[in-house]
Amino acid sequence: MSVAGVSRAWIKGRPVEPAQPAVSRQVDDYTVQCQQDLGELIIIRLHKERYSFFRKDPWYCNYVQICAPGGRVYHFPAYQWMDGYETLALREATGKTTADDSLPILLEHRQEEIRAKQDFYHWREFVPGLPNYVHIPSYHPPVRRCRNPNRPEWNGYIPGFPILINIKATKFLNLNLRYSFLKTASFFVRLGPMALAFKLRGLVDSKRSWKRLKDIRKIFPANKTVVSEYVADHWAEDSFFGYQYLNGVNPGLLCRCTCLPDKFPVTDDMVAPFLGEGTCLQAELEKGNIYLADYRILEGIATVELSGRKQHHCAPMCLLHFGPNGMMPIAIQLSQTPGPDCPIFLPNDSEWDWLLAKTWVRYAEFYCHEAISHLLETHLIAEAFCLAMLRNLPMCHPLYKLLIPHTRYTIQINSIGRALLLNEGGLSARGMSLGLEGFAEAMVRALSEITYDNLYLPDDFVKRGVQDLPGYYYRDDSLAVWDALERYVTEIITYYYPNDAAVEGDPELQSWVQEIFKECLLGRESSGFPTCLRTVPELIRYITIVIYTCSAKHAAVNTGQLEFTSWMPNFPSSMRNPPMQAKGLTTQETFMDTLPDVKTTCITLLVLWTLSREPDDRRLAQISHDIRQRNKCLPIPYYYLDPVMIENSISI
């Protein structure tokens, strides 16, 4: 190693072969001395050169710290891999916008860095109508088809599945975007043993219906939590059905209803028995006690065959009433078009009619959650935020320094997801009645309706009319985290941008914002996403939205997945019989025959098992204390937005 322009330097880093076990890693400090004072340091160059006959290992440099003769200490952060024999040009740690750089050498350095990154990172179309994603010329998907598990190069074989993972091929992204070896391996190691256990128990090959509901409990016998047990015990109760709209894994759908839509002709006679004495439907509408969950975005999407059987689909509407017993469903219609063959199901219908109607709603919840709230509104949008940042903001930019912790591993986990979960013939395709095309269609429709105001959390609650709804712990916790983030962002932004002119005059910032509008929102003006930012408050709002989306929002919709879905009837991914067109015909047998078969259930839960684990990146104390104190008094603790459970970035 050689360092140019150093009086005395400590270089901290670690030489690592990424595909080798962690035990081979070591961290080293290197000290380099210079006998003369080189004056004020502007840029240093860190060179990795060939050494004798030793192999070319990637080397990760943390930072270079320089102690000048006058006692001044310079800190040059690197935090990047040197894969070959190359030179890194590093600036000092202080965040600088273009306005802060007056020396031509520094302006040239930041421009060259952006040019190099734009030459390397390119946008690529994932699905027409969805946010574009990263295309790297050297990218080769690590997942391929092979039916011979004895081939030595395939060391990530999942028994019973034609999808194989070559862990050695995980060096397919630029090293600065990839997982550590342990993190990469843990993704597959988590999936492999569970898939093998399902295979050995004959579950992933079984196309039969579940014979008894209680058999579904046996899928994850050793992975129970307080919440998962509560779900399995109470899933059929109306009170728990309504509770999930507030504090389940998709808590952003419910809207206050002040006027019933014509397509949902619920009458007072239908629901009066469920509203309490001395009131009526119109009175409860006026009081603000009626809420609507409308799944119109799913209407008309085609289904596929699973296990050789045609699957079925619907876009239901569910009316709920908030009263002394909490949020309770009072009417369900399984189509967006009323008529004689589309009855409105009520709580006083037969037990199995009402239970199956609610299960159809939970099926619709699966797709609104997994496709829209989870994959689109966190993973895909966050990846666009990240890629635009990499392409337009140099490492010395204060916004790069602010945002980089919240983008760590996002491109990597999305690349793994596209290769393993969202590929033709992959796990998701074999567990969802909509297939990959239908799943993507739901996301395309949702992106066409997303607006900038939707992503501004405080306004969203007001827009949906739920800002004062009791027992809405998701709202309370998310607003507390949002407020903390906003105050933190405000302190940083106002330091580097003292006035509006500083915001409007930052060309790198403006390029980043423009690229997000073009590549994430696909240039749709009706989205309301800015193409430029002109004021300090606008920038604070924008950055808060980005950080919240990449951290707390993902935690809210991801962390509880397995707990709420391990009991499959609460969150089915497919339905094998058509929606009921008449009342009084549903029996326990037809209910069981409508649910996903054993194989489909296990494939879906394998995916959710893989995507659900405790986070590694955590933070924020007082909010955490308040949440834990409140949860002590709750039968179902809501802890998904406890700051210690929130990852800095979307990394799973």
Image: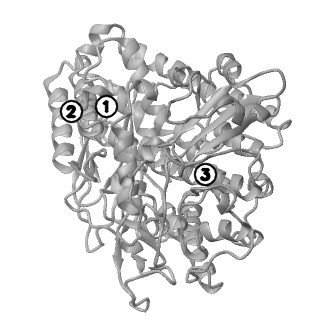
Q: Which residue is mark 3?
A: 362
Relative horizontal placement of residue 376, taking residue 551 as reference (left or right): left
Mark 1–mark 2 distance (CA, rounded to whole Å): 8 Å
Residue 151 in the image, given as x and y percentages of width and height: 38, 90
Residue 294 in the image, given as x and y percentages of width and height: 53, 38
Residue 629 location, quadrant:
top right
Residue at 78%, 21% in the rendered image: 279
Q: Which residue is mark 1?
A: 396
Residue 543 location, quadrant:
top left
Mark 3–mark 2 distance (CA, rounded to whole Å): 51 Å
Q: Please say if 7 is above or below 162.
A: above
Residue 473 in the image, given as x and y percentages of width and height: 70, 32
Q: Nearer the viewer, residue 609 or 187?
A: 609
Viewer-nearest of labels 1 and 3? 3
Say what amino acid the circle numbered 3 marks. Answer: Arg
Q: Quadrant of the N terminus?
A: bottom left
Mark 2 neighbour class, 10 Å CA radius: few under 14, some 14 to 19, many 20 or more: many
Q: Nearer the viewer, residue 601 or 389?
A: 601
Mark 1–mark 3 distance (CA, rounded to whole Å): 47 Å
Say what amino acid the circle numbered 1 marks. Answer: Cys
Q: Nearer the viewer, residue 590 or 460?
A: 590
Tell me if I can see residue 113 in this picture.
Answer: yes
Relative horizontal placement of residue 232, taking residue 163 as reference (left or right): right
Q: What secondary structure is found at the residue carrying circle 3? A: helix
Q: Please say if 409 is above or below 531.
A: below
> Mark 1 near mark 2, Cβ–Cβ under 8 Å?
yes
Q: Which residue is mark 2?
A: 110
Q: Please say if 151 is above or below 83.
A: below
> Mark 1 near mark 3, Cβ–Cβ under 8 Å?
no
